[in-house]
Amino acid sequence: MSVEETCHISTASPEETFALGERIGAQLWQGLTIGLVGQLGTGKTALVKGVAKGNGLVDGQCVTSPTFKLINEYEGRVLVYHLDAYRLKSSGELTALGFDEMTAGDAAVIVEWADLVRSVLPEKMVWIEIETSGELSRGSRIRGYGERACAFVREMRKA
């Protein structure tokens, strides 16, 4: 029986999505995997920019979508690997990029388009689905799988 916790957070602007990312970034730990899901333009990369700032990255300008590069790395309180699965043809390609080593190491890993590679993601993780609810409004459903990820979701709910 797996442990699961869910919360829903609404944002009304790109700035609020960034601020949500900051709250997430303040809670990162080594070994955490975050899967991000959402259509093009829903704010996945804006959220990651906030995560990087909340994790202590001073220059948020270096945070970009890794669509063509596949992996970006950001220094902060916790090292962050930011991956984009959009252009991968299979989950096996993610594994070939060294994904298992990234998730087993001293970093947090964020995967955009995580739904495309769900089969190789860890069982215990945080899953964030972002949906548009207006021109600038977004709804983020944050799910934690496993004890530590559920504690993460409970903290997000408090803020």
Image (cartoon, rainbow, N blue to C red):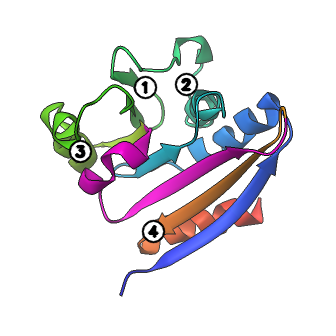
Position above or below: 45 against 110: above
Left or right for 72, reference 97: right
Please give the residue where the numbered disc 1 appears in the rendered image.
75
Position above or below: 120 against 74: below
* Residue type of the residue flagged with mark 2: Leu
* Residue type of the residue flagged with mark 3: Gly
* Marks 2 and 3 close (CB-CB < 8 Å): no
Looking at the image, tell me whether mark 3 or mark 4 is earlier in sequence order: 3
* Residue type of the residue flagged with mark 4: Arg
Q: Residues within 10 Å of mark 2 (few under 14, many from 20)?
A: many
Labelled disc at residue 148: 4
Please give the residue where the numbered disc 3 appears in the rendered image.
105
Circle 2 sits in a helix, a strand or a loop, which is it? loop
Does the rendering let one see residue 26? no
Looking at the image, tell me whether mark 3 or mark 1 is earlier in sequence order: 1
Labelled disc at residue 57: 2
